[in-house]
Image: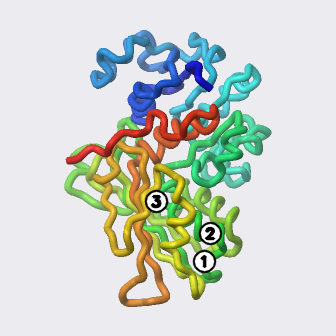
């Protein structure tokens, strides 16, 4: 497909929205034609985001006035509960959708409504949505009209486990633990006490131990690939005093005779955004800052040969959100998977 496609972004004033705008500036096959925001309606995009001066001349429009039906694909970078109300009409008009919220990620409506505390507006579409973990279901993504872009924690945890689960390498009835850390941008751009500099700076804390919304999403992926594992999955998220970045330390028990590094290298050998590092390596969040990359290493626990340790890092706003969304779009429209996503990580 050589012609440029028209792209719309709903909710373009958040961190994932501006990441989409940034990444799409270098994409040769896209043209951003419509960006919406109720709060910034009528404001020039580059006035709101000075980093985009000289690049975009678009003006934010209200969703009601925007001609989203003229787009080939629309990204929803909105809070949970928004996309499910607006997606049905756009799908009926032939527009393809990539939703970065959680509205279509969990296929069991009862579980979704329990965790997100609202009634789903279009449950009949959930079964049609393809879960967009790019390295898991590329064939389904290529045929999809509605993609549920995975959450940041689920991406960071699922990618290193995916090849091992597909080969049923994990021992049943043993704990699988994901100890995760995120930068404060994971909380979004809204005002909240917990993400204020005086609260998050020079501080480190766990949160939502009793139950994070990404828990059932990760369990859904685990259960799809290997049975009798998800029930023993433990997920503990932490907030770190950095702006962007995510790290998962995963503790797991593998069946005897499993060679996990070989399995990971074999599975990901043709995937441009997965970097399997040498055993014993320590992937750092700064090594993926601003890039659509997941770096992974695996090694035995030195004190216990029955336990393996996986380290996984991503940029929560890129591979954990906007970058993966663009990657999904590339697969969906038959573009080269790396288009618009060849950014080198920012250092320092």
**Visible in this render: residue 13?**
no
Categorize mark 2 by other alpha carbons within 10 Å: few (<14), some (14-19), many (20+): some
Q: How many marks?
A: 3
SS at mark 1 in the image: loop
21 to the left or right of 282: right
Q: Which residue position holds label 1? A: 170
Q: Earlier in the sequence, mark 3 or mark 1?
A: 1
Q: Which residue occupies 62% across, 26% down?
A: 1
Q: Residues within 10 Å of mark 1 (few under 14, many from 20)?
A: many
Q: Determine contact: label 1, label 2, CB under 8 Å.
A: yes
The type of colouring in the image is rainbow
In front: 113, or 92?
Answer: 92
Q: Earlier in the sequence, mark 1 or mark 2?
A: 2
Q: Earlier in the sequence, mark 2 or mark 3?
A: 2
**Looking at the image, which residue sits at the far right?**
124
x, y (%) of residue 33?
A: 51, 15
Q: Which residue is mark 3?
A: 208
Which residue bears the numbered disc 2? 165
**Foreground pick, 46 / 192:** 46
Residue sitting at x 41%, y 43%: 317
Identify which residue is drawn at 66% across, 28% down. Answer: 96
The correct choice, above or below, for 76 with respect to 242 in the image is above
- Residue at the image point whose x is 38% and y is 74% from the top: 279
Query: What is the spatial separation of the Cα atoms under label 2 and label 3, in whole angstroms?
Result: 26 Å
Residue 216 figure quarter: bottom right
Label 3, label 1: how far apart the Cα atoms are:
26 Å
From the viewer's side, name the closer residue of 149 and 1: 1
x and y, in percent, of residue 198 in the image: 21, 47
Image quadrant of residue 64? top right
Question: In this picture, is 305 found above or below 198?
Answer: below
Q: Position of residue 334 (x, y in %)?
A: 63, 34
């Amino acid at each position: 497909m050589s012609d440029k496609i028209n792209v719309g972004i709903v909710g373009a004033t958040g961190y994932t929205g501006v990441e989409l705008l940034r990444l799409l500036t270098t994409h040769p096959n896209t043209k951003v034609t419509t960006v919406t925001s109720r709060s910034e309606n009528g404001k020039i995009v580059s006035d709101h985001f000075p980093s985009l001066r000289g690049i975009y001349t678009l003006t934010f429009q209200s969703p009601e006035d925007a001609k989203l039906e003229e787009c080939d694909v629309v990204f929803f970078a909105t809070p949970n509960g928004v996309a499910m109300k607006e997606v049905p009409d756009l799908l009926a008009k032939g527009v393809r959708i990539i939703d970065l919220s959680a509205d279509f990620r969990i296929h069991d409506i009862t579980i979704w409504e329990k965790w997100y505390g609202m009634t789903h507006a279009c449950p009949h579409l959930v079964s049609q949505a393809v879960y967009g973990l790019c390295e898991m279901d590329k064939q389904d993504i290529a045929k999809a009209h509605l993609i549920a872009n995975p959450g940041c924690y689920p991406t960071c945890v699922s990618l290193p486990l995916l090849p091992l689960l597909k080969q049923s390498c994990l021992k049943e009835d043993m704990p699988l633990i994901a100890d995760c850390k995120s930068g404060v941008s994971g909380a979004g751009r809204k005002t909240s006490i917990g993400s204020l500099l005086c609260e998050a700076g020079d501080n480190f804390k766990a949160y939502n131990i009793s139950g994070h919304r990404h828990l059932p999403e990760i369990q859904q992926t685990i259960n799809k690939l290997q049975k009798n594992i998800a029930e023993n999955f433990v997920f503990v998220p932490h907030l770190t005093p950095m702006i962007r970045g995510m790290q998962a330390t995963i503790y797991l028990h593998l069946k005897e005779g499993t060679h996990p590094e070989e399995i990971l290298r074999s599975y990901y050998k043709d995937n441009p955004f997965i970097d399997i590092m040498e055993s014993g390596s320590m992937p750092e969040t700064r090594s993926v800052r601003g890039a659509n990359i997941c770096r992974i290493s695996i090694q035995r626990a030195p004190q216990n040969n029955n336990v393996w340790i996986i380290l996984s890092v991503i940029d929560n706003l890129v591979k954990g959100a906007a970058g993966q969304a663009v990657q999904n779009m590339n697969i969906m429209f038959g573009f080269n998977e790396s288009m618009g996503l060849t950014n080198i990580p920012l250092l320092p």
